[in-house]
Amino acid sequence: MPKLFLTNIPYDCTEHELQAWIESRGIQTAAIRVIRDLVAGVSPSFGYVELKDKTQILSAVSILDGRRLGNRTIQVQAAASALDRRTA
């Protein structure tokens, strides 16, 4: 499944809030993961979004990148696959 990598997510943002924000822009999500600091319990401001439709990856980046969520401007890019990271 294609994934997006999002940075600058508000520290208190939940997966549900992020999903609602993304899907309100017409992008279908399969799974969302906001990374959390295990000790503090807050997000270090990044996460991953798995899309239902792999053809939406480029349009999702252009629709979401630079948009505001809460008081922060979200940065979005296509997430590198594990294979891409190993060959880089």
Image: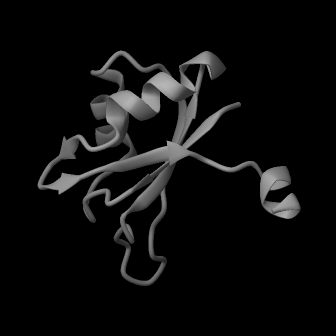
* Colour setting: one colour
Q: Quadrant of the C terminus?
A: bottom right
- Quick check: 86 left or right of 51? right
Residue at the (28%, 54%) spot, across then down: 13
Residue at 61% across / 47% down in the picture?
79
Query: Residue 3's quadrant in the figure?
Result: top right
Quadrant in which residue 34 is drawn: bottom left
Left or right, 87 with respect to 75, comes to right
Q: Position of residue 38 (x, y in %)?
A: 48, 77
Q: Which residue is painted at 75% across and 48% down in the image? A: 81
Q: Position of residue 16 (x, y in %)?
A: 35, 39
Q: Would you place residue 27 above or below residue 22 in this image?
A: above
Report which quarter residue 30 is drawn in.
top right
**Picture coordinates of residue 12 (x, y %)?**
25, 61
Kindly give the residue lying farthest to the left in the view shown: 71
Q: How many marks?
A: 0
- Residue drawn where x is 34% and y is 35% of the image: 64
User: As displayed, is residue 37 above or below residue 76?
Assistant: below
Picture layout, residue 54 above or below residue 39: above
**Left-right relation of 23 to 68:** right
Nearest the eye: 29 or 16: 29
Q: Nearer the viewer, residue 21 or 67?
A: 67
Image quadrant in which the N terminus is located? top right
